[in-house]
Amino acid sequence: MSSKNITNLGFITVPLVGTEVMPAWNGTTTKKVTVANLTAERAVGGYSFTAGAGGFISGGPITASTSNLTLTIDNITNYGQPLVINSAGSLPMLLQANGVSVVGLNNSNVTFTGVNLVQGTPAKGINFTANPHAAGMTSQLLNWYEEGAWTPNQGSGLAVVGAFSSSGRYIRIGRQVTLQARFISTTSISCSAFGVLCTNQPYSSDAVAFTGSLFGGSPTKGGTTATAGGILYSVDPVTAGGNITVTITYFV
């Protein structure tokens, strides 16, 4: 029998619908099988698979032995439909790396196991625009989290007798920064009113001045501190004592 292209068979409509019958030789006899059942329940291996205008690939498992598996939807923008990967039934869909499930998806949650959600592009993050907002809202995008240690320098407003040392911690969430600083002297340390405590904050504040709390030597000697443009200073004078501690929250 001569070979013919399937499109030359006048009574065949392409693409095939799956109910067409084809002969299949099993080594002993010739059987018939529908097109839909040619690969049913059979693993299909390959390096890439392309869906044409029908936009649908069914069956599995699909495995790639020596290369990453690439699933390509050809000219998806021409079809006007999104790519939909559906996990039928009650079980979630699992995304695996080296055989280990790292991401699970169901109709309620996305679960990450043993991995982190990594920000790939600066200034991009989690967008909360689905939530209602107050009239003064300027952004609903969370794109920054950071925490760490810093070492405040000795500002010009500090009067130090003995050896000077300092330490600090900070947390940044979005544009909001909270920092703590501690200035220590082996003998005594004090600060004049509106004296500069330090000038090397982890992040400089914006043009607005923000205030925080300040304690000199002990919690009973409280006062106010402020920051503006990256300068941390004491609003109130601090009498001589062993240390000065500061806590302040501001925006960048």
Image: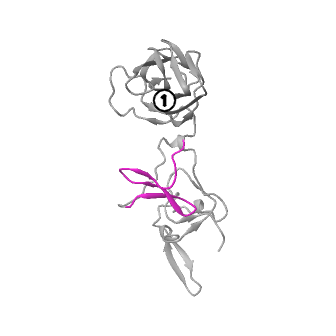
Left or right, 202 with respect to 178, comes to right
Residue 54, percent across and down? 50, 52
Tag 1: amino acid: Leu
Depicted 40 relative to depicted 70: above or below: below
Residue 154 visible, this orientation? yes
Q: Which residue occupies 53% across, 22% down?
A: 189
- Which range of residues does the magenta coloring cover? 91-118
Residue 40, percent across and down? 49, 70
Depicted 235 relative to depicted 175: above or below: above
Q: Residue furthest front?
A: 187
Residue 73, percent across and down? 56, 49
Q: Which residue occupies 53% across, 62% down?
A: 100
- Element carrying mark 1: strand
Using the image as rendered, state which of residue 209 and residue 191 is in the foreground: 191
Using the image as rendered, state which of residue 173 and residue 112 is in the foreground: 173
Q: Quadrant of residue 48?
A: bottom right
Q: Which residue occupies 57% across, 87% down?
A: 28
Left or right, 220 with respect to 185, comes to left
Depicted 38 relative to depicted 71: above or below: below
Q: Quadrant of residue 141?
A: top left
The stretch drawn in magenta includes residue 149: no
The stretch drawn in magenta includes residue 111: yes
Residue 229 visible, this orientation? no
Depicted 1 relative to depicted 138: above or below: below
Quadrant containing the N terminus is: bottom right
Q: Which residue is mark 1?
A: 179
Q: Which residue occupies 44% across, 57% down?
A: 93
